Image (cartoon, rainbow, N blue to C red):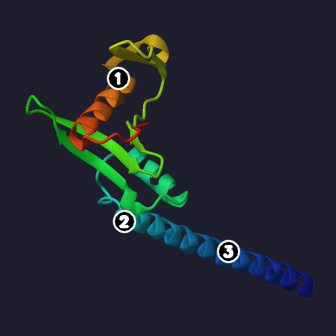
Amino acid sequence: MSELLGVILIFFLIGYVLYKKAKRDVIREQLQRQENIDLISSVTPIFRGTSTERFLILTLLKHGINSKTIFHDLYIFKPDGKTSQIDLVVATSVGIIVFEVKDYSGWIYGKGNQQKWTQVLSYGREKHRFYNPVLQNKSHISQLQRILKEKVPFY
C-alpha cells in the first residue's frame, strides 16, 4: 500500500513539474510573441502587408537595423500617374536596399531577363505566371532614383 502511495506521489510530482514547465513555456512564448508584435509595430501596423513581409521586418530589426531606417509598403507615383508599390526599403550607411518579397511554393521557372516567370504546383498540374520579381525590383529602384534625384547606391 505504501509503495502504491509512493508511486502515485512520484507521478504527481512529475506531472506537477511538467505542468509548471509547460505553463512557463507558454508564458515565455506569449511574451516573445508580444515582443515581436511590438518590434514590428515600431515600423508598420501589425496587419499591414503579408506575413512574409512582417517576418523580414522582424528579422531586420533583430539583426540591429534601426526601425527608423525601415520603410514598409511604400507607394510611389510614376510619371504616367499610376502608382508603384514597394514592399520594403532600408536606408543604410552604404546605400538603399530595396526588397521585393515573394512567398511562393512549388517550382519556380524563369530567367533574370524574362518578363514572366512560372510557378508550377501539384506535380505540373497547376501553373501560374507572374511578373519577374527581379524586373519588378529594378523598376522600383529606378522609380526611387527618379524621385530622390541623388547619387545614392541602390541594392
Report the residue that reaches farthest toward the front: 151
Instruction: Write the residue at 33% across / 52% down.
Output: 71
- Say what secondary structure mark 1 lies in: helix
Question: Which residue matches tag 3?
Answer: 21
- Res 127 seen here: no
Task: Please name whichever residue, 19 or 140, is drawn nearer the observer in this view of the structure.
Answer: 140
Q: Amino acid at mark 1?
A: Leu
Q: Is residue 24 above or below residue 72?
A: below
Q: Are marks 2 and 3 in contact (CB under 8 Å)?
A: no
Q: CA distance from mark 3 to mark 1?
A: 50 Å
Q: In the figure, is residue 4 to the left or right of 85? A: right
**Residue 14 circle label:** none
Q: Is residue 12 above or below residue 51?
A: below
Question: Which residue matches tag 2?
Answer: 42
Q: CA distance from mark 2 to mark 3?
A: 31 Å
- Say what secondary structure mark 3 lies in: helix
How far from the left and from the top, in percent, is residue 12?
A: 75, 80
Instruction: Write the residue at 34% across / 39% down.
Output: 151
How far from the left and from the top, in percent, is residue 87?
A: 32, 42
Mark in the foreground, 3 or 1 = 1
Q: Quadrant of the C terminus?
A: top left
Task: Please name whichever residue, 119 or 140, is drawn nearer the observer in this view of the structure.
Answer: 140
Q: Dividing the picture into quarters, in which one does residue 34 lie?
A: bottom left
How far from the left and from the top, in percent, is residue 7?
A: 85, 79
Q: Dividing the picture into quarters, in which one does residue 138 lie?
A: top left
Question: Which residue matches tag 1?
Answer: 135
Q: Check disc 3: other Cα within 10 Å, few if <14, some if 14-19, many if 20+.
A: few
